[in-house]
Structure formats: structure tokens, C-alpha cells
Amino acid sequence: MKRLRLTHRALDYLKDKQVQVITVDLESYGASLPVSVAVVHEAVPQKPEQYEKHLVDNITIYVFEPMEFRGNLVVIDRKKKLFGQAHLVAGDLKLT
């Protein structure tokens, strides 16, 4: 089972937005050379049975089961985009 950690920035972000559930999912971009990245959605997944369910700091976190992270650790953090809009990011995927 994966280990999960929310940074203080991520926890403050979730509390400010009153979000109780997040999903760490896998998305692929590109046609000829696809790149897969971990993304965080502020919602329950459409098919929760395909996800591991964790409770961290009173936040329910679903993580897509096939995903592998370096050190088996998923660190969820808050980042800011160019114009100051915040969003959540999830740890380093293990490249196979």
C-alpha cells in the first residue's frame, strides 16, 4: 500500500476551499509520444473501486491503484500557476 502525505500548504488549501475528498489520477498527454502525469482532482472518482482509499488529516484521498510512486510515497502539495491560481500536485511517478 502506498504511503501518503499532505504538505501544510496542501492541507491549508483544502481547508480554505472546504474540500474533504481528492483523487490522485493518471492522465496522458500527447499523441505520438504520450507522457503520463499524476493529477489531483477535488472530487470522488467515477469508479472508486479502481482506487486505493486513504484517510489523511481528515481528508479522504483516492489514488489510482496501478500508479507507482518513487519510494512508494505520494506527497500532495499546493503549487501556484503563473497568475497566482493555486492547484494541487502529487509526488513523483516511478518511471518503468
Image (cartoon, grey):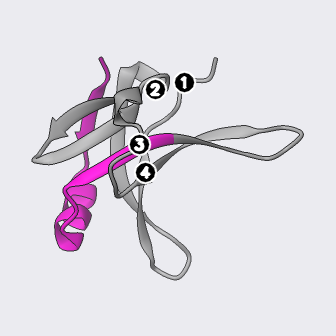
Choose the circle earlier in sequence order: 4 or 1: 4
- Camera-near label (4 vs 2) is 4
Q: Residue at x 16, y 65 (%)?
A: 15
Contact flag, marks 2 and 1 (Cβ < 8 Å): yes
Residue type, label 2: Phe
Contact flag, marks 4 and 3 (Cβ < 8 Å): yes
Give above or below for 35 relative to 80: above
Asked if residue 23 lies in the magenta stretch, the reply is yes
Q: For this view, does 14 lie left or right of residue 34? A: left
Give above or below for 9 relative to 91: below
The numbered disc on residue 4 is none
Q: Where does label 2 land, which residue?
A: 69
Q: Where does label 4 land, which residue?
A: 40
Q: Where does label 1 land, which residue?
A: 94
Choose the circle earlier in sequence order: 4 or 2: 4
Choose the circle earlier in sequence order: 2 or 3: 3
Tell me the quadrant of the picture where the N terminus can be found.
Answer: top left
Residue type, label 4: Val
C-alpha span from label 4 to label 1:
17 Å
